[in-house]
Amino acid sequence: MTEEIIIAGFGGQGVLSMGKILCYSGVMEGQEVSWMPAYGPEMRGGTANVTVILSDNKISSPILDTFDTAIILNQQSMDKFESAVKPGGLLVYDGNGITRHPERKDINIYRIDAAEEATKMGSTKTFNMIVLGGYLKVKKLYKLESVIKGLKKSLPERYHHMIPVNEKAIHRGLEIIKEVATVN
Amino acid sequence: MAENAITTKELIKKENLVYQKTRLLTDDVMHYCPGCGHGTVHRLIAEIIEEMDIQSEIIGVAPVGCSVLMYNYMNVDMQEAAHGRAPAVATGIKRLLPEKYVFTYQGDGDLAAIGTAETIHACNRGENITMIFINNGIYGMTGGQMAPTTLVGMKSSTTPYGREVSQMGNPLNMTDLVVNLPGTYFVSRQSVHTPGNVRKTKKALKKAFEYQALNKGVCFVEVVSNCPSGWKMTPLESNKWLAENMLPFYPLGDLKVPEE
Amino acid sequence: MEEFVLMKGNEAIAEAAIRAGTDGYFGYPITPQSEVIEYLAAAKPHERTGMVMLQAESEVAAINMLYGGAGAGKKVMTSSSSPGISLMQEGISYIAGSELPCLIVNVVRGGPGLGTIQPSQSDYFQSTKGGGHGDYNLIVLAPSSVQEMADFVGLGYDLAFKYRNPVMIQTDGALGQMMEKVKFKPQQPRSKKSPDWATTGKTSDRERIIITSLDLDPSRQERFNEKLQVKYRTIVEKEVRYEKIQCDDAEYLFVAYGTSSRICQKSIQMAREEGIKVGLFRPITLWPFPYNEIREMTGQVKGMLSVEMSAGQMVEDVRLAVEAKVKVDHYGRMGGIIPSSEEIVEALKQKIIGG
Ligand SMILES: Cc1ncc(C[n+]2csc(CCOP(=O)(O)OP(=O)(O)O)c2C)c(N)n1
Ligand code: SF4
């Protein structure tokens, strides 16, 4: 199995840490992983994105132009990455702030209103975990327990008290993700 | 809206104009973080150039630091220097174009770390230039590392447990150093954290440009400034922190004024 | 056994530096490598091993701190990115001229001048052909994964001390910023012994020691230069390192190092799906360069494409190696742009197969 993912949104949405948790979940299950962020002043208040590759085999290029999955969290990223999903691939997006919804007919599209849900849950910080939960519902990549272990590994010890809240958010994501269109 | 309220259209009229952006600033959107002092000082410099009507007679030197793109915002001729080398670049310009006004604009990493030698020697030679020194106590551009001016105990990404004197030495007070050099003619330390201070800074900067015409040496203005991003504070918090922590160590005022 | 951790390449270098028993790190912040010094600042290496780490006031100062520390017989290193490495060239030349060991990491970004902070490989000439003044060579290691970023710190020190020569790890912003799994070697103690050439204070049982690169007598200076050249020839004979990937049946060859070599591996998959038999030759030491090993490939392949994030620098060495026996061309992107795997396959078809 190889899964090539782009996660894209605003800096501060937890894009990079979501990627890191996915990678650590893969490591927990003995996989090869790579995490390649766009870096630079681009990050300051602007857009943030990370290319994540999870694979049973050695990873060749950590830098990609097309992806199996795009997780899209703002309009700029929609404009940039909708076309980069491979035919038959997956696009997961948060509807918050999206003015032009995805239009492609040859990919599977799911929507998750995680920003709204995070506010309801009283912690906007859990936003990225809700998205992650939703994504893992559609792509059953890992056992939940590997994901929780991955979460633990990627959080500094002083934040470990946050794990239960994050776990709850992942579960919430599993519940609220909605299918918009599928091709197969 | 009340019946008699004026509409936007009625409001936007020449006679109602109370403030206008100087034409010495371009229309480019500044990339600075919200609340950052760099933008304010840029505006002051631009206003002074306009007031003195010296656009055609001035050349600026931009540093490497957050203000590396200063040349995008200032509607004057500018050169970009390597990190820390602005005073040397300015020396080259001024020596070959002695009739022109030349200024440098540098952060604390640029002016007081990597460029210390150039700063000291330009000041010691008494180059007839204006040097503007933005002291925000941190490296903003590269993501908040310790600067020579970082206060004792202050956290940065390379002093995550706070600046410790035994390891990192004491903060370097560059302005106190250059004031002792015979080549400096006018030396002042100001700040832009309140409207009152902005006005005082403008006065000091204006003198620093006007005195340049006398060819008496370096006119040096330090502006104690903030870096909300690097300090990990809101703009308001950063201004308060500046007043409470930076100013006791970097007290404001003129340090060297010409005898009239 | 230690388990895998996920780390950025820059952080892996920093952790590996502590574990390799580094005595001193001296550096100055610059993107895209500031994580090295930031990691060290947070990891409290002083408490772990007694290792010294200091933020210098400039790269000029940092490299001279290395000079001093190396002359005192210690394991010392610095890291920077292109503009900072340019500033260090004077010091590097002095270190080579004084035959001192040290480790210099260059996380390359696009130039010339202030350029861009995005990844590049445009410092190849600077690293491999001198950089500073005088007849000298650095041993240059080019990692292509986060694991190698970590491993080459120890290897770098071994080579530096074996030959009393500065070693450079030349990597780029992409490898510095990306995270992969990495497994570290166990903590190595810092060395308690000083080499006998180090300035540690003259005792009555030995002559005094002078660290210098100066000799005003031309004939003695020439003899010293000849001695250096003998050392460099030994390094050329013994220390060439490279990797061949899918070369057994290859009819064409990519020659690439670092990030480019990773992208080429994807290009190989794509090309092979179309029936094009292409392999990868990856120099691991950029100096000494694997001239002979590349020349040997001319008996097997019909052409080679040197893929670099530069205007074409390593391609000159590939051409030297190949001696015009097969077609050699270059494909690259500049200014911080990373070529895509598709582009590279296309370039192979147009420049080598079709051309
Ligand atoms: C030779 C060299 N070394 C390092 C850098 C990286 N660098 C860019 S700006 C900067 C420091 C900026 O700090 P400061 O001068 O205080 O300005 P600020 O960003 O805070 O306004 C550094 C270290 C560089 N561009 N060139
Ligand atoms: S990082 Fe700091 S100095 Fe730079 S623009 Fe932002 S607030 Fe200003």
Image: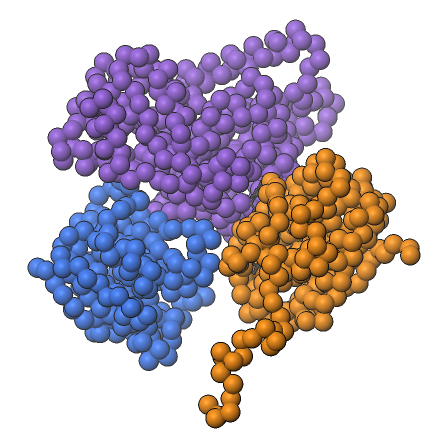
Residue B260's spot in the image, x, y percent?
A: 91, 56
What hue represents chain A? blue
Quadrant for ligand 2 reads: bottom right
Query: Is residue C221 at all visible to an observer of this figure?
Result: yes
Please tell me whether residue C129 is drawn above or below residue B101 in the rendered image. above
Residue B109's spot in the image, x, y percent?
A: 64, 49
Q: Residue furthest bottom?
A: B3
Residue B214's spot in the image, x, y percent?
A: 83, 48
Q: Is residue C1 left or right of residue C225?
A: left
Indicate the quadrant containing the C terminus of chain C: top left, top right, bottom left or bottom right.
top left
Q: Residue furthest left?
A: A184
Q: How many marks?
A: 0
Q: Is residue B75 left or right of residue C320?
A: right
Please tell me whether residue C153 is drawn above or below residue C32 in the rendered image. above
User: Which residue occupies 63% across, 74% down?
Assistant: B18
User: Which residue occupies 38% across, 37% down?
Assistant: C148
Residue C93's spot in the image, x, y percent?
A: 59, 25
Q: Which of B78 and C112 lies nearest the eye of the viewer?
A: B78
Q: Is residue B68 left or right of residue C111?
A: right
User: Which residue occupies 16% across, 32% down?
Assistant: C272
User: Which residue occupies 22% across, 43% down?
Assistant: A57
Q: Residue furthest top?
A: C219
Please tell me whether residue C289 is drawn above or below residue B110 in the rendered image. above
What hue represents chain B? orange
Dividing the picture into quadrants, the one containing residue C313 is: top left
**Rendered image coloring scheme:** by chain
Q: Is residue A34 left or right of residue B3?
A: left
Dividing the picture into quadrants, the one containing residue B52 is: bottom right
What hue represents chain C? purple
Q: Which of C21 and B260 lies nearest the eye of the viewer?
A: B260
